[in-house]
Amino acid sequence: MFETESRSIQLDQIDWNDTSCLITYGPLPHKLLLSIQTVGLIAPPLLQGKKNGLFRIVCGSRRLAACKKIGLDLSPCQVLPSFLEHQTCLRLAIYDNVAQRTLNPVEKSLVLAKMAKYLEEPQLVDEFMPVLDLEPSVTLFDRYLGLHDLEEMILDSLATGRLNERIGFVLAKQEKEDRLAYLRLFEELPFSVSVQEELVETVEDISRRENLTPQQVLSSKEVTTLRQAHESPARQRAQKIRKYLRDRCNPRLTARRERFAQETRQLGLPSGVRLVPPPYFEGPKWILECTFERAEELASRLRHMVLLADQPKLQTIMESASGVSSREVGN
Amino acid sequence: MVRGILASLPEIPVQWVDRFGEDRKSETSKTLEVARFRGRFVKACPGTRFYNCCGYQILNFANQCSLGCSYCILQVYFPNSNVRLFANFDDLLQQLDDHLRTSRRKVHRIGTGEFTDSLLLDHLTRASELLVPFFAKQPSAVLELKTKTSQVDLLEKLDHRGRTIVAWSLNPPEVIDREEGTASSLEERLAAARRCQDWGYRLAFHFDPLLAYPRWKGGYAEVVDRLFSVVDPGVVAWISLGSLRFMPPLKAIIKQDHRGSTILDEEFVPGLDGKLRYFRDLRVEMYSRLKDLLLKVAPDLCIYLCMESNDVWREALGFIPAERGGLSAILDQKVLELLD
């Protein structure tokens, strides 16, 4: 433990530009402003005197920012001795914060990046990842460290939970313009986290194949039209964009699906009956789905299907779907 | 074996360790790890019930490969990028002997090329000098040495008695240059194959992975032309065809570690075993074309598909293995013909 001195500090004596111990990131909580306005500052922030006569914030940056915003001049503070090493102050800031709340992904990244100046990677992983409620893995450590250099817009989304850290990890590997293009799409339309991951991979595949940047794919005429179709609900637009990108990424599969759909339409299946090919048209097992409300309805649909099952048309669809033509079988 | 390796590398620093440390993938693999293996050296090839499996058996004397092929699945299998050699060959030969004596199989096709390249380190380990004579004494077993190198020098003087098959994985030169790291060129591989042919070995070739790149049709046609301008089809035990397939985690590794690779440019779909593959129509087209090219030169060649379903077999080769007793039986029969 360290001796601290209780003092009232003028807010203009604080070096606001010194963020070396700052590990908080995100908007000021409204309730903090309300609390200070109503009952004053209950827990004094922790500062450290600097050689230039100003004070560095160690703990309580948001409390002090709230005081400033409210228009207070003075704040009760605890002041640490100036000889205390910076690493020690940083540790105080980290442990003080993690004891009170769960840090957001940007703050976790800040902790690791700032401590990396003082500790080797194995020690950081072993000591600080568990403190941050993270699995002590080198891979995960690298991923969090990658968040540190992202653009403010992305960091804001991560800090407020609008963007999941899994997507942050993925975007960190992209070029700046590309990741901002992804961010705009993900903020605009409701995609789940796993679909966002899928979309990044799909767009990457398209980009590589068509020699375009992801940003160019996402701003292509087709995607833009779907994004701007405001007459449809956002969820529907999101689904259409996902389908469009998947189809563009898988032209062979899409062509086969379209052909299969056309052939089954021509087959004339009874209503309520659906023929489902094997996944990706590969494998021996087909599914026939039949929905019905009454037993007679079921019987009628099944009778119809028995007749269709004897027709060469159905056989042809199955053979062409699995790629086997009747001409070649048995050769 | 360890003494031999150390003697042939007098300048290389050696460190004796109780355990191997964690190896970061980003580092170039420059360390050869030599260890005692305490597990089973002989295992069945991990086929899957969804596809026709060839019934191969694996003799595992090393893990990992340093050739650096972009598509190599070993990058996923082994987190460590160093090659790890299991040097207790006395145990290996003892286990192999026990296995061959006690197994109910009539024929054994055993290969060392599943978890490493069979001949990559042969100049250091001289493993072929132990394995080839061992198999020469076996009445119903063959050893297949699969490689992408041309390191066959040690095979010249060995008494193999036709029980070692030397096999190469083949691809067009532009694919080798772009995707196969420091592996030997096509010409070097074929020259090495020719030397083995001259020493009386049976040969095998694996067009695996077949890669669909823009010029694949012409590229593979040229490989087949080159192959049979150098090698006598009569000494070829078998040729396998297998299109590119990989577990999904390999995709990220290819993107990160093989930036010049173009193998991810094609369309992939998940197969029945969860691996990503080319869409089946493309696979069938590739197999059919290769089969036609190969059989045009040598109509009696034994050609098989690696890890493919019956409908792909039927469409590409015109039959399914079950009609001829199963793929394993087809290849076993081929071995019996070779041993006659």
Image: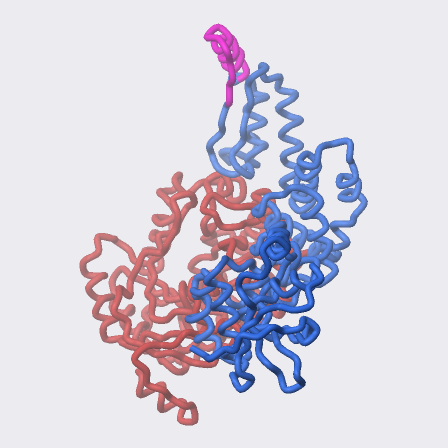
Chain colours: A blue, B red
Q: Choose between B139 and B59: the one closer to the eye.
A: B59
Residue B166 highlighted magenta (yes or no): no
Evaluate whether residue A68 shows in this view: yes
Q: Choose between B272 and A80: the one closer to the eye.
A: A80
Provide residue B124's location: percent of width, then percent of height: 39, 83
Q: State left or right for residue B36 relative to residue B198.
A: left
Q: Quadrant of residue A19?
A: bottom right
Q: Quadrant of residue A263?
A: top right
Residue at x 21% of width, y 56% of height: B103
Provide residue A86's location: percent of width, then percent of height: 54, 81
How would you classify the magenta stretch by its main secondary structure?
Answer: helix
Evaluate whether residue B241 shows in this view: no
- Furthest toward the top, the residue is A296
In the displayed structure, B315 sits above or below B229; it is above
Q: Which residues are magenta?
A: A289-308
In the displayed structure, B171 sits above or below A291; it is below
Residue at x 56% of width, y 20% of height: A312
Residue A292 highlighted magenta (yes or no): yes
Provide residue A181's location: percent of width, then percent of height: 73, 54
In the displayed structure, A26 sits above or below A53; it is above
Residue at x 78% of width, y 42% of height: A222
Query: For the N terminus of chain A, which image quadrant?
Result: bottom left
Q: Choose between B292 and A29: the one closer to the eye.
A: A29
- Furthest toward the bottom, the residue is B11
In the displayed structure, A278 sits above or below B278; it is above
Q: Choose between B190 and B112: the one closer to the eye.
A: B112
Q: State left or right for residue B76 relative to residue B128.
A: right
Residue at x 51% of width, y 72% of height: B67
Provide residue A308's location: percent of width, then percent of height: 55, 16
